Amino acid sequence: MSPLVSVIMPCYNAERYVKEAVQSVFDQTLRSWELIVVDDGSTDGSPAILRELAAREPHMRVITRSTPSGSPAVPRNEGTDAATGQYIAFLDSDDRWLPDKLMHQCYLMHTTTADIVYSNYEKTDARGTRAGRVITAPETATFRQLMRGNYIACSTVIYNTYTLGKRYFPQIGHEDFCCWLSMLRDGYVAYNTNTVEMLYRISDTSVSHNKLRTVAWTWHILRREQGLPLLTAIYCLMSHLAKATMKKLN
């Protein structure tokens, strides 16, 4: 019998955090899941940790890449190819889910017309310490709304492959933002559970820590990937920057 949810986790040199991330999947109250971890050529202790975890959990499997891809899009896409569940969810190897995450999201999808669901989340420091720094996103996300600021955190997303098919990440910066836009541009609406379901670790080594680089990524998506006119793209970029600043202050 196929699992209800396929959880995709890319991993690259995450030995400090990956065990906590994996354990947060093991601890889910909804039990019908498979966890697919794609190790992207790690050179630290991550592969050994993943082997030990997979040895005690039959619903976890590890795909090992021989060389690093340099992009989280590649391991996420490989995990998506291997997924067998109706729903696909994403969890980064330095984040953690709260125990009812999958149960709350699947309940919303089963009782409404939602095909894409996300949630609020809480920031932690690099050690994972919580301090009530909750990021509350709007109740829905449409294409037009998200163009003015990405408030959907990757590690909160789950979507229905029976309606959307399998969706893949482009190999560009802010690949998750671009992927959500591709879903919403097709006319789908994403819905928030309006609950906190993920702990987001703030680290100096995170991909999005370099703010100038993330601005360049966003501009590329607005102008090149989505083809917005210059003035519209500038307006959307300014909206992104304002919302990012407000989020940073939380």
Image: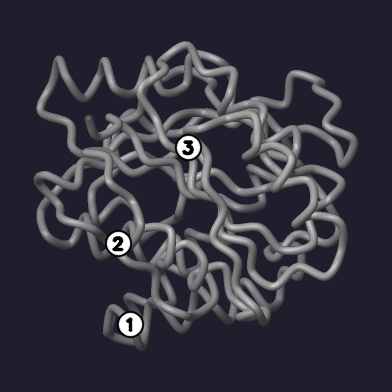
In the displayed structure, would residue 186 be above or below residue 222?
above
CA–CA distance in space, label 1 to label 2: 10 Å
Q: Are marks 1 and 3 in contact (CB under 8 Å)?
A: no
Secondary structure under the numbered disc 3 in the rendered image: helix
Tell which tag, 1 or 3, sits nearer the viewer. Answer: 3
Q: Is residue 174 above or below residue 136?
A: below
Q: CA distance from mark 1 to mark 3?
A: 24 Å
Residue beneath disc 2: 181
Sequence order check, earlier mark of 1 and 2? 2
Tell me if 151 is positioned left or right of 95 in this view: left
The amino acid on which the numbered mark 2 sits, given as a three-letter code, is Leu
Q: What amino acid type should be assigned to the residue bearing mark 3? A: Thr
Query: Disc 1 marks which amino acid?
Result: Glu
First in sequence: mark 1 vs mark 3: 3
Q: Is residue 148 left or right of residue 249?
A: left
- Front of the two marks 2 and 3: 3
- Judge left or right: residue 247 versus residue 229: right
Q: Give whichever of discs 2 and 3 has the lower sequence position.
A: 3
Residue 185, above or below 36: below
Q: Residue at x 15, y 52 (%)?
A: 164
Residue occupying image coordinates x 58% and y 57%: 10
Question: What residue is pinned by disc 1?
Answer: 225
